[in-house]
Amino acid sequence: MGGLCGSAPQSAPSMGETTVVVHGDIFLTDVRSALSILKIGEIKYHHQGNEILLKAKAGENVDKVMELAEHSPILEEKPSGKKHIGSSHEILMELCLKDQRNAPKKDAKGKTVANKGPKVPNLYPTQYEKHIREILEWYLLKLKPHSLHFFKQVSEAIKFEIDNGYDENPKGAEAKEKNKKIDGNT
């Protein structure tokens, strides 16, 4: 159930522990980024992909808020059920603040075990918050709109070529035309 591409899947959460459930399509970059931060930050999580979208398409009654998962990740804290919806950078910053790498760990018997080794730096260092926000604003205002537009144009061009039967190799298309003329004797 859920997990990053090529990684071991995360098990479903057991009762009594706080777990983040990520709703959203794995093909969305923001969902994959959220899952990466959860894995790096050792935060207990569970990914719920397209189940909600499939239910909505099947005509089942689905929460309208959860339908947003088709376009953006939605975080849900279990067992409280609190949902977090926002722009991708807000969701990612919130996940970074939940970093559990320095938190005390428990062994198989449930006893607290001291962390070995040096303290790991936080995923969102507060002393650099101003610089992080400046870079995020630049990314969101300058780079992301242009890169999204570029990818949209490339995907539309590929779809156009596929729909209209264009061959990848122009010489291959010419050879097909010659073969049609020979076969049809025209």
Image (cartoon, rainbow, N blue to C red):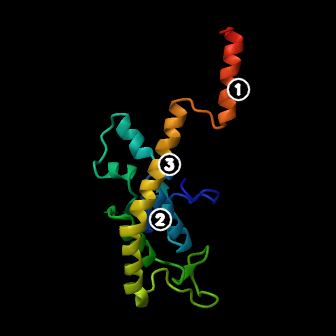
Give the CA distance from mark 1 to mark 3: 27 Å
Mark nearer the viewer, 3 or 2: 3
Q: Amino acid at mark 3?
A: Val
Within 10 angstroms of label 3, few (less than 14), some, or many (20 or more) residues?
A: few
Q: Amino acid at mark 2?
A: Ala
In the displayed structure image, the side of residue 33 where residue 168 appears, left or right: right
Q: Which mark is residue 184?
A: none
Instruction: Determine contact: label 1, label 3, CB under 8 Å.
Output: no
Could you tell me residue 143's position as x and y percent? 43, 67
Which of disc 1 and disc 2 is earlier in sequence?
A: 2
Which of disc 3 and disc 1 is earlier in sequence?
A: 3
Circle 1 residue:
175
Picture quadrant where residue 116 is located: bottom right
- Assign a secondary structure to mark 3: helix
Identified at 49% across, 64% down, the residue is 33
Mark nearer the viewer, 1 or 3: 1
Give the CA distance from mark 3 to mark 2: 25 Å
Q: Amino acid at mark 1?
A: Ala
User: Image height check: is 153 above or below 29?
Assistant: above
Nearest the eye: 173 or 55: 173
Circle 3 residue:
154
Q: Is residue 13 visible?
A: no
Instruction: Determine contact: label 3, label 2, CB under 8 Å.
Output: no
| Residue with the most extreme left position | 64
Give the CA distance from mark 2 to mark 1: 48 Å
Could you tell me residue 98's position as x and y percent? 44, 76
- Assign a secondary structure to mark 1: helix
Q: Which mark is residue 34?
A: 2
Could you tell me residue 41's position as x and y percent? 52, 74
In the displayed structure image, the side of residue 126 where residue 113 appears, left or right: right
Nearest the eye: 123 or 164: 164
Q: Is residue 18 visible?
A: yes
